[in-house]
């Protein structure tokens, strides 16, 4: 249990600022709502300050105008402690986002345990948002963005953890349906499809967790950071989810508004790549 919790503790996080092209060109299912760029930038600033307040050192990367979704850094890599697999995002428009992340991890953070998707399997795709890591095992969304070859490469990179593929149907990523709220609490739910996916996660888990089902139209994505849980406002996630979270999750709640990212199908986990550079000492 101690080991699992420590793997969800972070010393560092990489974030990337929002390009002007975000509003017009970010990938999104529903383009009817206008994104307010200034508001999005403010929301990201608050998020960064909250990470820092939880003791995380934040590395802030410049945006790239040719990569409208580049703020969603979670999709570019999977990190466990200081071992990182650089991903190959399923949507071709997002692949070049990985370059700046690789440079940052290598040159700014000096990481050496960096793994790449192999060149000889260029069909393999993996989005970090499809990876739900509990500290003890992985659940990997099998989605339009992440395929079986991507899952296999993840499994080869982190052989000490069980990996289970979960079909996520019409959802973008597995973390739209379930996220860790603390080291042993998985929170999930949403519409009927999301409930079914969450049920599959529950029935294939290799370890005992507390699963919390929530009723919401606003997405279940929360972010566990060093004994805190980041969550969105009551207006965004609905009264029932909000109450459940505050009543049942034993972590310090950190509330923030993330409306502008939701308009581009993003949420709290998406905007940072979290690492623990002391991982080796902790295990
Ligand atoms: C995309 O469709 O790729 C972006 N607009 C949203 C990515 C959200 N990422 C995440 O949940 N990890």
Image (cartoon, helix red, strand yellow):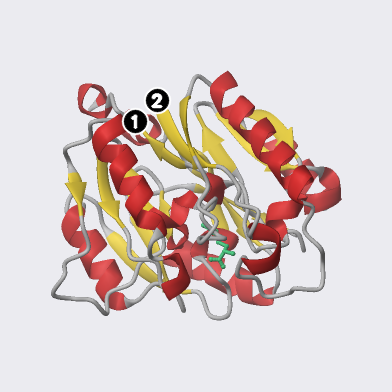
Q: Which one is in front, 209 or 94?
A: 94
* Position in image of residue 279 (x %, y %): 27, 29
According to the picture, the residue beneath numbered tag 1 turns out to be 276
Q: Work out which quarter of the rendered image holds the C terminus and state it.
A: top left
> Which element is circle 2 on?
loop
Q: Which badge, 1 or 2, comes first in the chain's sequence?
A: 2
Residue shown at 29%/43% (left/top)?
103
Give left or right: position of 18 versus 278: right
Q: Quadrant of ligand 1?
A: bottom right
Residue shown at 26%/52% (left/top)?
85
Give left or right: position of 93 versus 236: left
Disc marking residue 139: none
Q: Is residue 177 visible?
A: no
Residue 191 occupies quadrant: bottom right
* Position in image of residue 40 (x %, y %): 72, 46
Give left or right: position of 35 versus 152: right
Q: Work out which quarter of the rendered image holds the N terminus and state it.
A: top left
Q: Is mark 2 within 8 Å of ligand 1?
A: no
Eyeballing the image, is 163 above or below 45?
below
Q: Which one is in front, 61 or 214?
A: 61
Residue shown at 55%/59% (left/top)?
69
Please say if the residues under marks 1 and 2 sit with CB atoms less than 8 Å apart.
yes
According to the picture, the residue beneath numbered tag 2 turns out to be 11
């Amino acid at each position: 249990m101690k080991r699992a919790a420590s793997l969800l503790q972070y010393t560092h996080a990489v974030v990337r600022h929002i390009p002007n092209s975000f509003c017009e060109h970010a990938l999104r299912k529903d383009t009817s709502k206008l994104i307010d760029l200034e508001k999005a930038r403010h929301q990201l600033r608050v998020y960064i300050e909250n990470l820092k307040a939880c003791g995380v050192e934040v590395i802030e990367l410049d945006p790239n105008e040719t990569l409208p979704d580049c703020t969603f850094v979670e999709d570019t890599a999977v990190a466990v402690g200081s071992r990182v697999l650089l991903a190959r995002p399923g949507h071709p428009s997002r692949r070049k986002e990985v370059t700046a992340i690789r440079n940052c991890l290598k040159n700014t953070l000096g990481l050496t345990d960096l793994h790449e998707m192999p060149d000889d399997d260029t069909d393999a795709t993996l989005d970090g948002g499809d990876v739900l890591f509990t500290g003890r095992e992985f659940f990997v969304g099998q989605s339009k963005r992440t395929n079986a070859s991507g899952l296999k490469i993840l499994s080869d990179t982190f052989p000490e953890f069980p990996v289970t593929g979960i079909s996520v149907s019409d959802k973008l990523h597995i973390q739209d349906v379930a996220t860790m709220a603390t080291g042993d609490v998985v929170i999930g739910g949403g519409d009927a499809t999301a409930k079914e996916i969450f049920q599959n996660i529950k029935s294939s888990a290799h370890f005992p967790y507390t699963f919390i089902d929530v009723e919401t139209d606003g997405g279940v994505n929360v972010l566990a950071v060093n004994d805190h849980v980041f969550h969105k406002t009551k207006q965004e996630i609905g009264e029932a989810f909000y109450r459940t979270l505050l009543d049942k999750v034993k972590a310090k709640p950190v509330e923030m508004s993330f409306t502008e990212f939701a308009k581009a199908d993003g949420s709290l986990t998406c905007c940072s790549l979290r690492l623990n550079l002391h991982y080796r000492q902790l295990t």
